[in-house]
Image: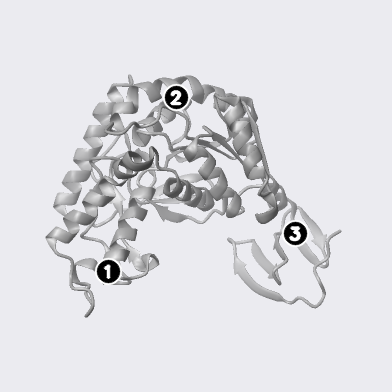
Amino acid sequence: MLVAPHAKAARSIRCLGDTSQRTSFGSLYSVVFKDDSTTILKGVRVSSSVQESNRSNRIAIVGAGAVGSTIAYAAMIQGLAHEIVLIDSVAGKAEAEAKDLMHGSMFVPAVEVSAGGLDQCKGARIVVITAGAKQRPGQTRLELVVTNARIYREMIPKILHSAPEALLLVVSNPVDVLTYVSLKVSGLPRSRVIGSGTVLDTSRFRALLSRRLNVAVGNIHAYIVGEHGDSEVPLWSSAQVGNVPLQSFSTPACPPLTAADRAEIFHNVRDAAAQVIAAKGATNWAVGLAVGRILEAILRDEQSVLTVSSLLEDYCGVSDVCVSVPCLVGREGVGSTLPLPYSEPELTALKHSAELLKATARQTGF
């Protein structure tokens, strides 16, 4: 039985709900104690249910291309899972990526990386789907819809046959439409079908604002909503730097943003993927980190606010479409949406984006 070193005192305690607390002993142990089924660790009660939950953090990634393998890498270095399985229609590709990642296991938290078929989704808490046709230079995400929707119609039932309790995290493009297709094909509740949405676009937006304003990106709060694509909407009216509205923010070294500044920043956010694809053939690093962030929010039950794509019903007049708005994300998947104070032009643009996605979804038969 493991015993925490006697000389190490508990450094912190934080509440995890009405009946749970987490105690960290030095930098070596983190234990949870509850009033239910427990085991004993040097006088500290450890919840067996939590231990089991930690052991069951298995992620399956369907699609072992540039994006899928980068998501696996991000999950490894963040210590998000104890098992990661890569799945690809080209078995040798998945096996090679898994082997390459496994060779670095000495440098990351303990994790088992393997490759297999869709049957290896069994036991996964989350199935990340990156499989599908790649976006070619000059091609819009929505032009991919018919091909990738056909792939999803065949793939989703096979995934759920192996992992009926899993959350589905859709990354393939056009992500909003494929999230809707996945929801309809699977019959799962809204909370369990999530698209990566505009989490990446929001990061691009904040990164460019950070560079322009010379302020740390973590102190910038601004969102991109709507489609992950050409009709996405920057929310300038609610953007803040620290607690200061962006529209009134300035420093001696940084004057307020002009209309031309805003236009240039949004152009570089919206067209970022096209710029990268034209130069190197694909985007992978930033989207890998973005999906890693979503995985973290789910697996650590953070209830974080993220602009994931999910089914909206009567949200500011938008219904029956998967589109990105700020939502709470935690262990059960996607939760409540946040009623942001949209300006009239922003709300009009969001509704236009939603209608465009609805029309595109109809091309898939839904």
CA–CA distance in space, label 1 to label 3: 47 Å
- Which type of secondary structure does the marked residue at label 2 adopt? helix
Q: Which of label 1 and label 3 is nearer to you?
A: 1
- Residue corresponding to mark 3: 46
Q: Which of label 1 and label 2 is nearer to you?
A: 1
On the image, the x and y values in percent for residue 78 come to: 58, 55
Q: Is residue 112 depicted above or below 43 in this figure?
A: above
Earlier residue among tags 3 and 2: 3
Q: Is residue 268 depicted above or below 148 in this figure?
A: below
Earlier residue among tags 1 and 3: 3
Identify the image quadrant of the C terminus.
Answer: top left
The residue nearer to you, when weighing 311 against 75, is: 75
Left or right placement of residue 351 versus residue 20 in this view = left
Residue type pointed to by label 1: Leu
On the image, the x and y values in percent for residue 144 come to: 33, 27
On the image, the x and y values in percent for residue 218 come to: 39, 66
Is residue 329 in view? Answer: yes
Specify few, some or many for label 2: CA neighbours under 10 Å numbering under 14, 14-19, or 20 or more. Answer: many
Earlier residue among tags 1 and 2: 2
Specify few, some or many for label 1: CA neighbours under 10 Å numbering under 14, 14-19, or 20 or more. Answer: many
Left or right placement of residue 112 versus residue 74 in this view = right
- Residue corresponding to mark 2: 152
Residue type pointed to by label 3: Val
Q: Which of label 3 and label 2 is nearer to you?
A: 2
The image quarter in which residue 85 lies:
top right
Q: Which mark is residue 213?
A: 1
